[in-house]
Amino acid sequence: MEMCETVRKMTQYEWELSSESIAERYGIPLERVIRFDMNTSPFKPEFSFKGVELNEYPDPSYANLRKLLSEYAGVPSDRIVVGAGADEILSVIARVFLEKGDRAVISTPTYPMFRVVIEGSGGIACEVQREDDFSLDEDALISQMKERKAKLVFICNPNNPTGNFSELKSIEKIAMGVNACVVVDEAYFEFCGRSSAKLLKKYENIVVIRTFSKAFSLAGARIGYSLSSECIAEAMNRVRMPSSVSSLSVFLAEEFLKNKNRMERNVARIVAERKRLAEQLRRLGLEVFPSNANFLLVRFKSAEYVFEKLIERGIVARKFSSDRLKDCLRFTVRNREENSLLLRDLGGVLDE
Ligand code: PMP
């Protein structure tokens, strides 16, 4: 595994100490720490939220959030990097590994942002098609990686938009078979409960990416994080912006991690609804792909027609332009009431 030359030459950015760590180090109360070093305003804004201090910068290392994430994910906090959504983390990784013209492999159909971050870093995306049931073709991935001297491979697990989960032995086979970084995007981890984080102890080249946008109901707050080896985390810290996650978002993520029960209840509700919705859609005579995430991929005779008829009724599905998925639509599993509306309207459209 080789990071790009530019990043290897970059000097480590020295984070400013957070007020909390200064208070702790020098044994003084937190409220006695006054920031004359940050060029911020001494005046507190008129509006705030739950006492979050908005006139000062957040701790750029997000130490407290990383501590809570460490307990949640079972990975030491110095191997965790926090960013403004999983998308920012994806772009940070692309910048760590890709120089202009470097290759990165994606296993399609998959999350379109992988290509965007690869090309945004000057890299070239090489597609390896998934099997007919959308499982990974590990041998083809490994041989493409070797042939193209790829620096990076992106695997979405469970995969968006197909919903299937690749067993950890597939991920392990790839991590073992390539001398490159293996990014496992686990944005939908909580809906399946199985994670490649287990493999981090054994493989230095794996990076697991997660988000608060799905199971934690915080898409608007923009918080994501990665779990990796220390050396990858250290390189990511050189490249990332120091305070891209706002204090409000950090506060929300911390609160939600301290009260995980609510998220867990919601995940259980979505998983139950996923089963009900899939059954009902199959009763309408549709092909529904098995899903480990919070969405279902469904095949139609004419996806374009169904998409148009649904959107006229205010029901917005996700459609696709790629050949392999052009007869499919993806539906997020929402609450019981909303899913029932989808079933009613879809039933109406199919009967027309
Ligand atoms: N990865 C995958 C696989 C996703 O589906 C999404 C959201 N659509 C993201 C990452 C982006 O997550 P975030 O909102 O944390 O940027």
Image (cartoon, helix red, strand yellow):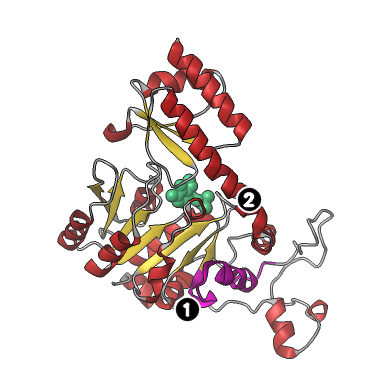
Amino acid type at mark 1 = Gln
Q: Residue at x 57, y 37 (%)?
A: 334
- Residue labelled with disc 1: 12
User: Which image quarter holds the N terminus?
Assistant: bottom left
Find residue 256 and report its horizontal and vertical position in percent.
Answer: 66, 58
Magenta highlight range: 57-80
Find residue 208 and report its horizontal and vertical position in percent.
Answer: 43, 63
Secondary structure at badge 2 equals helix
The question of residue 176 being in magenta is answered with no
Q: Nearer the viewer, residue 92 or 307?
A: 307
Find residue 338 and report its horizontal and vertical position in percent.
Answer: 60, 30
Find residue 199 and report its horizontal and vertical position in percent.
Answer: 38, 70
Looking at the image, which residue sits at the far top?
352
Callout 1: few (<14), some (14-19), or many (20+) C-alpha neighbours within 10 Å?
few
Residue 349 vs 141, above or below: the answer is: above
Dots 2, 1 in contact, CB < 8 A: no
Q: Residue at x 45, y 76 (%)?
A: 234
Q: Nearer the viewer, mark 2 or mark 1?
A: 2
The question of residue 65 being in magenta is answered with yes
Secondary structure at badge 1 equals loop
Checking the image for residue 265, the label placed there is 2
User: Which image quarter holds the C terminus?
Assistant: top left
**Direction from residue 93 to residue 335 in the image, left or right:** right
Q: Nearer the viewer, residue 294 or 50?
A: 294
